[in-house]
Amino acid sequence: MPDSHYAVKAIICSTLVNLCWKVFVGTKDNFDDFCKYAPLKGENVILSGHCKMDGLALIKRKKSDRKKIILAPHHTVDIDDTSSLPLSNFLTYSDLFLELPQKYPQIDFVFRPHPTLFIILSGIVLRGETGVIGWGKERVDDYIKKMSSFPNVEYQEGGDYFETFVNSDAIIHDCASFIMEYLYTGHPPLYLLRNKESIKEVFAPIGQKCLEHYYQAFNEQDIINFIEEVVLKGNDPLKEQRIKFAQEEIMVNYPHVSDFILQHIKDELTT
């Protein structure tokens, strides 16, 4: 397996990036990586923050007496433990995901799989310890039908997710991009992991830092405990440090990143 900096280095050292006049990056970790690995050693890099996330601040939370949990499984079901991005645990927890809405009728669930998860499952055949594990279109359709049938489940097939983030109370996922983005909400997140070793093997340092402020699940009981203790009972011991970490290391210039970038460009062009 390539080291956890493999993808980062590939982007930073690409010809396209190094031909750019200015490169605006989201975190101090990103900036430090450019200074360390890029041919220009960060000369064209500006620490700005993530302009994409500015829009999150414009969304107002709706009042609700019910808790809402996002279930967001990743698509990498066809990648084994020797590959560079073994993130998805959907095959392990697919049955549990169907049980949760019945086990917790007092909770609303948003089932939001990665857009390509069921496309992959419809067409591939996976090999496991017990032989061939094949889903196919019929089984995928049946799964979606079952999940959508629960009155306390909203099935999302894609589109903007900021409103979903703001109006949720927690997330259970193994998606890469959501690791950092959900921290903007302040709500408790649970990340599904295959083992402790995968954290350093798969994730870049900034991802590892984010996961230090996540609740982590390695089995079904970890998921149940998160729902019952953190979501329902409100016992969130990581909250203070999670919010502090997000504000200090993730939410750079939030929610005015776009303004910062525009002003920087104007200043560069007029001086």
Image (tube, rainbow, N blue to C red):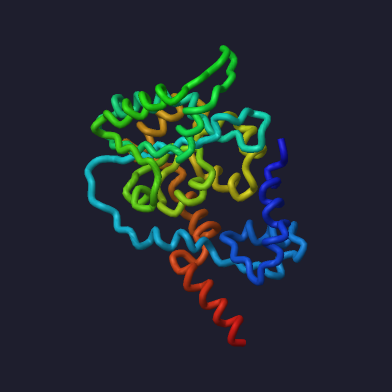
Q: In which quarter of the image is residue 61?
A: bottom left
The answer to which of 209 and 75 lies nearer the viewer is 75
Q: Quadrant of residue 148?
A: top left
Instruction: Please give left or right for residue 245 compared with residue 6 in the image.
Output: left
On-image quarter of the C terminus: bottom right
Question: Which percent across, then down, holds residue 132?
Answer: 56, 16
Question: Which percent across, then down, holds residue 194?
Answer: 57, 29
Q: Inspect this view and state whether residue 235 appears.
A: no
Compared to 86, does 10 lie above or below? Answer: below
Q: Residue at x 35, y 31 (%)?
A: 228
Q: Which residue is drawn at 29% across and 40% down?
A: 67
The answer to which of 219 and 173 lies nearer the viewer is 173
Residue lying farthest to the right in this orientation: 39
Instruction: Please give left or right for residue 140 compared with residue 10 in the image.
Output: left
Compared to 25, does 268 lie above or below? Answer: below
Instruction: Please give left or right for residue 148 compared with residue 243 in the image.
Output: left
Question: Which percent across, then down, holds residue 34?
Answer: 69, 60
Compared to 111, does 249 lie above or below? Answer: below
The answer to which of 271 and 167 lies nearer the viewer is 271
Q: Inspect this view and state whether residue 11 appears.
A: yes
Count how many numbered circles sit on residues in the image: 0
Compared to 209, does 140 lie above or below? Answer: above
Q: Which residue is drawn at 47% across and 73% down?
A: 259
